[in-house]
Image (spheres, rainbow, N blue to C red):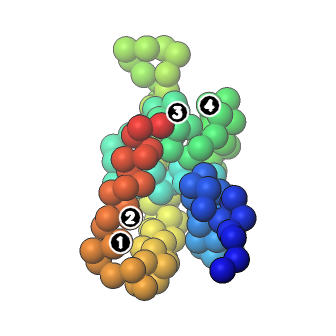
Amino acid sequence: MQEKDFVDSYLPYLLARASFTISSEFHAQVEAAGFTVSEWRILASLSGVKQRTVGELADIVLAKQPTVTKMVLRMADQGLVMRTACTQDKRQAWVSITPKGQKLVQPLLKKAALHEKQVLSSLGDTQSHALKSILQKLIVKA
């Protein structure tokens, strides 16, 4: 029996590799729709919620806050999102998706759900739910 390389059983590598493999398939569809991956993540994270702060978006899209601030300003200029000042804390801004942004992201949300279903199909419902639950626990712990 051949001994496995370290990375073949190293959790951070396995998570990164799985994420890259799964995401690459879908990111091609995002780019074909005219969005960057970060723009897609911003629009997807705003869909279905009233608003989020730029800081929350930065955490969700896995980017630095100044980068997300610039992207939000550009997306606001395009009419995809709306940025409003936070009345309690002037250092924060609220971001919400516009009807135009929602209309453009809706087809991608459907494609994302279909892509996820295809990726998880070989696991079945029980393992799919378990995988997501484990990942959510790892994220909260980090």
Distance CA(mark 4)–CA(mark 3): 7 Å
Query: Tag 3's secondary structure?
Result: helix
Distance CA(mark 1)–CA(mark 2): 5 Å
Q: Of circles 3 and 2, which is in front?
A: 2
Residue at the spot 56% in from the left edge and 46% down from the top edge: 61
Distance CA(mark 1)–CA(mark 4): 32 Å
Q: Are marks 4 and 3 in contact (CB under 8 Å)?
A: yes
Q: Is residue 35 visible?
A: no
Label located before the other in sequence (2 or 4): 4
Query: Tag 2's secondary structure?
Result: helix
Q: Specify few, some or many for label 2: CA neighbours under 10 Å numbering under 14, 14-19, or 20 or more.
A: some
Which residue type does callout 2 highlight? Leu
Q: Is residue 122 above or below residue 87?
A: below
Which residue type does callout 1 highlight? Ser
Q: Position of residue 34 (x, y in %)?
A: 68, 67
Q: Nearer the viewer, residue 22 or 65?
A: 22
Q: Nearer the viewer, residue 9 or 43?
A: 9
Q: Specify few, some or many for label 4: CA neighbours under 10 Å numbering under 14, 14-19, or 20 or more.
A: some
The quadrant the N terminus occupies is bottom right
Which quarter of the picture shows residue 58? top right
Q: Of circles 3 and 1, which is in front?
A: 1
Q: Are marks 1 and 2 in contact (CB under 8 Å)?
A: yes
Which residue type does callout 4 highlight? Gln
**Disc assigned to residue 54:** 3
**Disc assigned to residue 128:** 1
Give the residue at mark 4.
Answer: 65
Label located before the other in sequence (3 or 2): 3
Residue at the spot 50% in from the left edge and 64% down from the top edge: 105
Distance CA(mark 3)–CA(mark 2): 29 Å
Give the residue at mark 2.
Answer: 131
Query: Tag 1's secondary structure?
Result: helix
